[in-house]
Amino acid sequence: MLGACASPLTEAYDLAMLDLDGVVYIGGHAVPAAAEAITTARDAGMHVGFVTNNASRTPDSIARQLTGLGVPALPGDVVTSAQAAARVVAARVPPESRVLLLGGEGLAAALIEEALIPVTAPEDGVAAVVTGYGPDVLWRDIMRAAVLIRDGLWWVASNGDMTLPTAFGLAPGHGVLVRMLEQFAQVSPQTAGKPHRPLLDETVRRLGGQRPLMVGDRLDTDILGAHRAELDSLLVLTGVTGLAELVAATPGLRPTYVASDLTGLLHAQPAPELDDGSASCGGWRARVGTVGSRSTATVWQTTGGGSPPWRAGSTSTSTGRPPTSVGPTHRLPAGPRSRPHRPDRVGAWTTRCPRTS
């Protein structure tokens, strides 16, 4: 069941922690309406911070990119998984400790900020190894780090993302390296980035806020991370998650609120109403049923109401056992990265998923 908020989210929460890719920008372009929504949220008194699992870049470079896209930002508004990883290390080892670095500029800067000494050669002894995405990391350095981890050196990973968006397409992320090191060393790292708590805890510590709200486009990182950090969350449908993925989400992956984009911060979130096995909200109704061996979630418009259909659709599925998976061709509604599912009839859409056992 989705949460409800009688006042605009900008009034109910004092800190919005925004994921970047798929929420604020996609590639080199701002998400439509994002800049205006962020400006309006700030004018309403909400502190806006930017949270990213990208450990290779510094907050300064990210702030410059945001400002260039029409979203004014200072380095202090940005919190990265590199900063969270450095904080994890600093909490355990003494200041001025040497830390083996397997990553990029952002991770090195974060370690220095925490009064630690990043080194790329372990000959003189190191207190830990920290890994993160770095396009220039050498294989020989990976091999040396792998042996040290296998032999007992404490290991902190910035994040476990398996993919990384690039100008030439979706590429292997730092999680691929993490998995390889795990398989070789038979050791798992302490991970700082989403969906683990350290990054969100570090964001609240740096930016303040008594009532923080996590805002993201991914269920498996942003929303799961919010659950683990015991925070409310807003899912925006401008990135990788569409209605089909949302209605298939298990309880631990369900957001508190859902909106088409960041303008959802500026509005109240009405409570969907449950009635006779279906859910309705603002002129939309949704029902879960079965067709043969498959479960279905059907959403249709009943009036010209203003609330978006996904509030009714995502609530309807929570009345029973959710579907386990959804094919990408059934994504609805469409964001910049997806195409809309063809309606079965005017004003209605259906998504079909395998029935759970």
Image (spheres, rainbow, N blue to C red):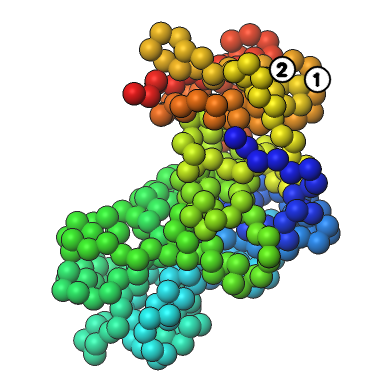
**Which corner quadrant holds the N terminus?**
top right
Residue 214: percent from left, percent from top: 61, 54
Marks 1 & 2, CB-CB < 8 Å contact:
yes
Circle 1 Cα neighbour tier, 10 Å, few/some/many (<14 / 14–19 / ≥20): few
Q: Please provide percent x and percent y for residue 12.
A: 75, 53
| Classed neighbour count for the residue bearing mark 2: other residues with Cα under 10 Å, few (<14), some (14–19), many (≥20) | some
Residue matched to label 2: 301
- Please give left or right for residue 85 compared with residue 38 in the image: left
Given residues 137 and 109, the one toward you in this image is 109
- Residue 192 visible in the displayed image: yes
Residue at x 34%, y 23% (from the top left corner): 357
Is 333 above or below relative to 28? above
Q: Secondary structure at mark 1?
A: loop
Q: Give me the disc on residue 231.
A: none
* Residue type, mark 1 in image: Gly
Q: Quadrant of residue 147?
A: bottom left
The residue where tag 1 is placed is: 304
Residue 136 seen: no
What percent of the width, then of the height, locates residue 37? 76, 50
Name the residue at 58% across, 55% down: 231
Residue 7 in the figure: left or right of residue 271:
right
- Distance, label 1 to label 2, CA atoms, is 7 Å
